[in-house]
Amino acid sequence: MFQQFLESLDKKDFEIKRDMYRNGRLVVEIEQKHRDQDWKPSGLSVTTAKWWIYLFSDDSFLAVEVQRLKKYIEVNSDMEKKTFAPRSYNPTRGYLLQPEDVSKLMASELYDTKER
């Protein structure tokens, strides 16, 4: 899998997000709303990337396969969907993963997408 990740770098087969507040939480966007329009799928819902890269700082990041992240969201379907920047021109909806959630996402076999 690591080799596939390295090959994806050449293909630009990744999506990059940033932790603006440097609080260790990971936001997973799934919808957005442009001014006076309805909510539309975005972020994880529409990405064609294979890898989801989340920058926690300039020298610290997490790389997770998109399918693993989607499986995490599916398995944890009881998570509350939140609205981010609700008064902005372009609010988004999605999930807020706390540091302990990120740890589970990365380490638990429950979210593995490949047979061992």
Image (cartoon, rainbow, N blue to C red):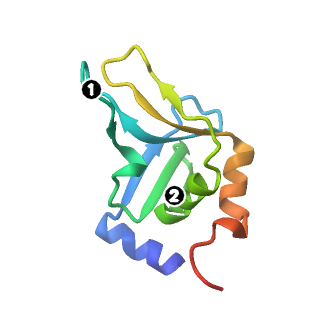
Q: CA distance from mark 1 to mark 2?
A: 24 Å
Judge from the rendering whether residue 41 lies leftward or rightward of residue 20; answer left or right: left
Judge from the rendering whether residue 110 lies leftward or rightward of residue 46; answer left or right: right
Residue, x 25% and y 20% (percent of image)?
Answer: 35
Which of the two discs, 1 and 2, labels the residue nearer the N terminus? 1
- Report the amino acid beneath label 2: Lys
x, y percentage for residue 57? 55, 41
The correct choice, above or below, for 115 with respect to 66 in the image is below
Q: Which mark is residue 70?
A: 2
- Front residue of 28 and 78: 78
x, y percentage for residue 97? 63, 42
- Report the amino acid beneath label 1: His
Q: Which mark is residue 73?
A: none
- SS under mark 1: loop
Res. 48 image quadrant:
bottom left
The correct choice, above or below, for 73 with respect to 49 in the image is above
Q: Which mark is residue 34?
A: 1
